[in-house]
Amino acid sequence: MFIEDDEHMESIWVQTAISAIRVIAFVCDVITFPVYLVLQQPWKRRQQSKRIKAKPISADDKQVTYRSVEPPREIHVKMVQANIDTLEKMLTYVAKIHTTKKCLGTREILSEEDEIQPNGRLFKKYNMGEYKWRTFTDVENSATNFGRGLRELGQAAYKNIVIFAETRAEWMIAAHGCFKQNIPIVTIYATLGDDGVIHGINETEASIVITSHELMPKFKTLLAKLPKVQTLIYMEDQLNKTETDGFKDDVRVLPFNQVIRMGNASKTVAAPPSAEDIAIIMYTSGSTGTPKGVLLSHKNCIATLKAFSDVIKVYPEDVLIGFLPLAHVFELLAESVCLLTGVPIGYSTPTTLIDTSSKIKRGCRGDASVLKPTCMTTVPLILDRISKGINDKVNGQAPLQKAIFKFAYDYKKIWTQRGYETPILDKLIFKKISKLMGGKVRVMLAGGAPLSPDTHEQIKLCLCTDVVQGYGLTETTSGATVMDAKDMISGRVGGPTTMCDIRLCTWDEGGYRVTNKPHPQGEIIIGGDSVSQGYYKLEKKTAEDFFEEDGRRWFKTGDIGEVHPDGVLKIIDRKKDLVKLQAGEYVSLGKVEAELKTCAVVENICVYGDPSKQFTVALVVPNPKHLKELAIKQGVPDAEFEQLCSSPVMEKAVIKELAEHARKCKLQKFEVPAAVTLCKEVWSPDMGLVTAAFKLKRKDIQDRYQHDINRMYAS
């Protein structure tokens, strides 16, 4: 009784305090409005947001094609004037311009120490120093010598070489060393399963593999299935000596720096590529079936560099923090834009990124705090986790602090939508959150998968940064559309870049037609210089997905989009993700998953729809912390995570949470899963249930959990 009275009094007190804050804010608004109006000129921001980004260049009742109205910017024009049509020419060009400027940075690891955790367990943590930098001249020289060293090892031009390593400075140096000798690089994700690695190396018939200290033990077991591999080059570890014993007798094993030294003493001359030569065979992460090798020429890569440089504004003080896989076309091209524009790249890892990362010693700062980047590339998975982290922190605060944050968030949202900035509020409330990534990030480039509009908005507001979403595929060298930084509408992926056209083609089966109102809809077809030559050794699949028309190469994406009046594209579906239920409703599984993934209790989710049934079901990987909190609310006694996942009570509770969250996201009732299975395992690339880019492998998930799917439908 007394507790209820206390809670009631606290609630009244909080409401009174917030009401007082609203009054103060209103008075401040009235006083400062003329000043902000003159200084910020919000009408210009609104005009920029609404301006036309692309226009139709051809249309009929089956298709409509859009082209950018934006002119090429300075860097694009300079590339054309300097005849830069290969990645080899690009590095040579920028090294002459930027010479002694910082180029690639690696953080020094001083020691690895045991640290006792609050629960008594012992974890190994890094004691880290500052960033050590290579200049543009250093990088150019190292790449030149590495390429020569490869030739000394017998690597010929046009013969494939594999890079199978984590993101780091040596990865980029190795790649450019290969480009200088016209050696195509085969990129394979470091997190790809053994079968995928074996497939990529054997299919491309590479005799040399460039890897890293951490991945060397993997090759002791894999080499037996890699008959053509004769040489392993490993990137050294800062602290530990690499174990090189126990490998096949006929395989050479040598360190990265030894290859550079061999090249330094070599008289081999460069064998520069032409624009049409293959620069990269990039293995897609393979959400369906075996990974495919996508053929990317120097012309493809340069087209995307021109396109990105037309939309990404660069400042002299910019710094990028690189931690996504360089084996992903999005990260590789984003970092290449940094090289092109003279932006230093400081490398990091997911385990050392922020102060609370798993390998950072207590009292030591994470990479972002030391580097203080202004730019970063990211993927929706990471942004969703940051968003949930913000929500957890806010929900864990006292009622008054929670209410103040909500007021500040709503206040900033309203004024931002009107075209204003809120510098005082940012300094008082949101800058504390932005310090998570060093406090200076001004732009985040998001790609790889659709980003939830709610997450997009929250990250922009709370981290005080622009979140620029893009759309592209490995098959289009990551280039297709990039969101304008001035665009005030969330959930869209931008207009076509200056280097490609976007076409919508009617897909009658799904009901997506270019004649639909209010916006034309259809399958997205991409045409231009960034479109790949096709798939390596897969002529039939290449013929299915690619075609030539009017001197341009086009790729059928399988994605469904709609184009708004300002020429901006929104991804609304995917052909393979569309399921028609028994009652005739179409459900976009990917769209539903993207929305439900932002629910606090969901770590990952796969929605399944049986066309012979009237509802969908879901396989949910729950967030352990939130599942436990939900269990307490349900009165479920303290239990282990596995026991909670098996509890029918918890399944019903999660269904209720999903339904409530779906309502907030404005999902239709038939789109919301009617039954769930709580999965005990976290889905990882090693399990084969998600790709290296963490996209769902639906068929593999269905096969693994078919018994649970049957049970859910039977219930």
Image: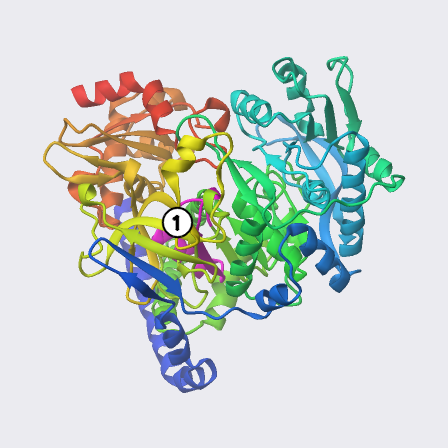
Toward which corner of the image does residue 184 lie, by quadrant? top right
Above or below: residue 125 compared with residue 665: above
Q: Is residue 623 visible?
A: no
Amino acid type, residue under disc 1 in the picture: Leu
Above or below: residue 98 compared with residue 351: below
Q: Would residue 200 appear left or right of 236 to someone viewing this image?
A: left
* Residue in view at x 37 percent, y 31 percent: 622
* Residue in view at x 66 percent, y 52 percent: 345
Pick out the residue farthest to the right: 265
Near mark 1 (Cα within 10 A), the count class, few <14, some 14-19 or many ≥20, is: many
In this orientation, which residue lies closer to the viewer: 411 or 317? 317
Question: Which image quadrant: the N terminus?
Answer: top left
Pick out the residue farthest to the left: 583
Toward which corner of the image does residue 315 lie, by quadrant? bottom right
Question: Which image quadrant: the C terminus?
Answer: top left
Residue 222: give x, y in percent of width and height.
62, 17
- Disc 1 on helix, strand or loop? loop
In this orientation, which residue lies closer to the viewer: 9 or 62? 62
Q: Mark 1 sits on what residue? A: 451
Magenta includes 463?
yes
Q: Would residue 631 appear left or right of 308 to someone viewing this image?
A: left
In this orientation, which residue lies closer to the viewer: 380 or 576? 576
Residue 207: give x, y in percent of width and height.
68, 25
| Magenta region | 447-474
Residue 627: give x, y in percent of width and height.
36, 32
Residue 486: give x, y in percent of width and height.
43, 68
Magenta includes 405?
no
Q: Is residue 23 visible?
A: yes
In this orientation, which residue lies closer to the viewer: 561 or 157? 157
